[in-house]
Image (cartoon, helix red, strand yellow):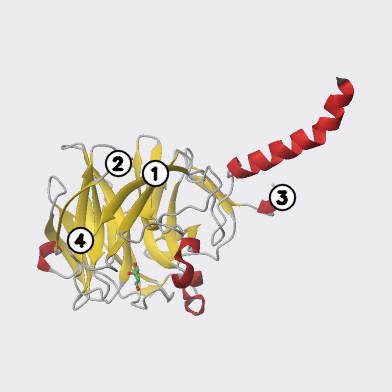
């Protein structure tokens, strides 16, 4: 028995290592690298958005895995309690062309808002045809954060063109949609009480920017966006204002411009308000247009305050969502 065990031990340990390799707990966020979910698969939640319900974060995004049925568009949902380990909760949207938009129709940048009054989860997304001329938002609704979401309608918010969308929930819980209106600029608008409509314009920032995101930090609003260069990265910029109505300052770089935002494009600013500190995370996509399933993410805690915002050079880091503190991690691979 003893001998048998001895003989088997190397095999058993190898099996354990292989098994644990697939479900290894993440203690580090490695910007730009493959980000395995709790099943060991690269997270598919591109152009995404995050909400927090109780202690759980939900990350929704474009599911772009290889081998999906090309007749459908998919939105994935992942859940996490620590922002590092993400469990795939399934594709919460699997939708066929809802508005006769043609074979190469587009569903991008899904964002989910939870409405406290109706208790519904309301998903907004950019809905378009292959030439991006339709420029509408679509809405799908669910009773649960993990779906399934049912398509309801599409429209142009406040009758304006809308391509990239961003979501902003203010500290008082008010929900806003940020949308790119190509002829004019970047609009911020309040959602209606039930979130099923876009009701009131707060600002039109006359800058041609997409990938819009906003954060409210120490009495100032910071908005960031990217230039309009398709899937190619460009220098993303930020502006600030004392209220959502403005006045907004000139846009300034958020990173060394020659790095094109370290090869990424903004999608959201996540505020982690912990017991000891508040960390704002720049959440961005590193698009790989020819191999979209391999598109990566850059998440970095930003330097922010007194009207300044800066995304430091991406390096491995870790966060404690309870305290709100983060730190760089040296030699992450050896940990
Ligand atoms: C840039 C946008 O930010 C993306 O969401 C996507 O619409 C691409 N353009 C398409 O070229």
Which one is nearer the viewer's eye here, 169 or 61? 61
Pointer 2 or 4: first along the chain: 4
Q: Residues within 10 Å of mark 3 (few under 14, many from 20)?
A: few
Instruction: Please name the residue that numbered disc 4 is placed on.
Output: 137
Which one is nearer the viewer's eye here, 184 or 39? 39
Q: Residue at x 45, y 68 (%)?
A: 287
Pointer 3 or 2: first along the chain: 2
Q: Which mark is residue 147?
A: 2
Is residue 192 rendered to the left or right of residue 222?
Answer: left
Instruction: Please name the residue that numbered disc 1 is placed on.
Output: 90
Question: In the image, ligand 1 is in what quadrant?
Answer: bottom left
Pointer 4 or 1: first along the chain: 1
Instruction: Please name the residue that numbered disc 3 is placed on.
Output: 334
Determine whether the residue tagged by mark 3 lies in a helix, strand or loop: helix
Pointer 1 or 2: first along the chain: 1
Q: CA distance from mark 1 to mark 3?
A: 31 Å
Q: Residue at x 36, y 76 (%)?
A: 230
Asked if the residue at tag 3 contacts the one at tag 1, i.e. Cβ–Cβ closer than 8 Å, the answer is: no
């Amino acid at each position: 028995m003893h001998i048998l065990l001895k003989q088997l031990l190397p095999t058993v340990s190898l099996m354990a290592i292989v098994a644990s390799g697939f479900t290894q707990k993440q203690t580090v966020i490695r910007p730009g690298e493959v980000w395995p979910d709790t099943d060991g698969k690269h997270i598919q939640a591109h152009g995404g958005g995050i909400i927090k319900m109780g202690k759980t974060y939900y990350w929704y995004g474009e599911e772009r895995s290889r081998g999906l049925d090309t007749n459908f568009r998919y939105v994935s949902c992942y859940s996490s309690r620590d922002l590092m380990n993400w469990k795939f909760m399934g594709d919460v949207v699997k939708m066929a062309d809802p508005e006769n938009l043609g074979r190469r129709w587009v569903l991008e940048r899904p964002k989910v808002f939870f409405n406290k009054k109706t208790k519904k989860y309301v998903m907004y997304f950019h809905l378009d045809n292959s030439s991006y001329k339709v420029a509408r938002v679509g809405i799908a609704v669910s009773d649960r954060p993990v779906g399934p979401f049912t398509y309801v309608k599409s429209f142009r918010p406040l009758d304006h063109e809308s391509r990239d969308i961003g979501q902003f929930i203010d500290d008082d819980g008010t929900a806003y949609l940020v949308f790119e209106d190509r002829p004019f600029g970047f609009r911020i608008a309040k959602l209606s009480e039930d979130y099923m409509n876009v009701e009131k314009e707060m600002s039109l920032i006359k800058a041609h920017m997409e990938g819009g995101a906003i954060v409210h930090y120490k009495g100032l609003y910071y908005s960031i966006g990217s230039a309009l260069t398709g899937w190619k990265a460009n220098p993303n910029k930020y502006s600030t204002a004392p209220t959502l109505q403005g006045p907004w300052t000139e846009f300034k770089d958020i990173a060394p411009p020659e790095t094109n935002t370290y090869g990424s494009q903004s999608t959201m600013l996540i505020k982690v308000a912990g017991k000891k500190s508040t960390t704002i995370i720049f959440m961005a996509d590193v698009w790989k247009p020819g191999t979209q399933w391999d598109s990566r993410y850059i998440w970095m805690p930003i330097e922010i305050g007194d009207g300044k915002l800066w995304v430091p050079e991406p390096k491995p880091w870790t966060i404690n969502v309870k305290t709100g503190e983060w730190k760089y991690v040296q030699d992450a691979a050896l940990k």
